[in-house]
Amino acid sequence: MTKLRGAFTALITPMNKDSSVDYDGFRTLLKFQLEQGINGIVPLGTSGETPTLDEDEEQKLIDIIMPEVRAFEKTHNVKIPVILGAGSNNTRDAVRYTERAKKAGADAALVVTPYYNKPSEEGIYRHFEAVSKVGIPILVYNIQGRTGKNIDTATLSRIAELPDIAGVKEASGSINQMMDVIAAIKSKHPDFAVLSGDDGLTLPLIASGGDGIVSVVSNLCPSLVTEMTQAALNSDMETARSIHYRLLPFFKAAFVDGNPTSIKYAMNYKGLPAGSVRLPLVEVHAEAKKVIEAALKECGL
């Protein structure tokens, strides 16, 4: 199983003005990420507006991703893990999407806590038990703010005992919970990756024994996020802190009016392919635009 460690971009899905998918823009963005040295990519997640993409659109994106990444790996003699989003609140669909990720040749599948249903801890465990049987590494995605349900550490510890559980994208927002996960699970499973789901918590998480970040901000500045993450992982805390505090205003601004609306506005402002968002998401409001622009200027981006 590939060890998941470093900076991974939660890729947005560029849209045209009519809200259709901008496939050319997506290819451009993907190449930008690879050329800027990102350690891995996470397409078809929340930042990719997957809830409003249909399966044909998702497949077309996968058909762009896999050849581009594999060709880059071959020519540059590097490994770039692709973690394909495979989440659903319907376990049967989550299994089907995980099978799709395996068939595509992805390195792992990102599977979110079932949302809206609000299952019990036993229901959460059985959901991940079902997807773990597919036979591809699974990155558990814990994000109570979007799902309405936190995966407690005891349940995550049970899930970690299942086959092919590669780690967790921890977006609970609680550094204490993240440290509990590290203390309870990594001692038994050293290769279990604990990745932050919040850009601003990357540095403290790695300092506590974590493994990196699934980043929204790196859609705009992959090289800086990668440099910060690798410096922290290499115990060069002076460099990591310097970049962390440089980017801190944008860590905050990138979510000032929701995600991926805020990061898309920042990318459009800086000339990167992002485009519009699909309803029910709408463009950021006027005051948010000012906050984002000011943060970009302050960070020197």
Image: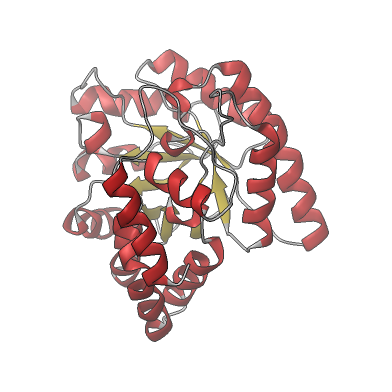
Residue drawn at 17 percent across, 58 percent down: 176
Asked whether 253 or 239 is in front, the reply is 253
Q: Is residue 29 above or below residue 110?
A: below
Task: Indicate the quadrant where residue 154 lies.
Answer: top left
Q: Is residue 291 left or right of residue 96?
A: left
The picture places residue 273, in percent across and down from the top left corner, at 60, 44
The picture places residue 111, in percent across and down from the top left corner, at 42, 33
Residue drawn at 51 percent across, 40 percent down: 12
Asked whether 258 or 271 is in front, the reply is 271
Residue 240 visible somewhere in the drawing: yes
Q: Is residue 217 above or below residue 276?
A: below
Residue 198 visible somewhere in the drawing: no
Residue drawn at 40 percent across, 36 percent down: 162
Q: Is residue 117 above or below residue 223?
A: above
Residue farthest to the bottom? Answer: 238
Q: Is residue 279 left or right of residue 156?
A: right
Asked whether 98 or 213 is in front, the reply is 213
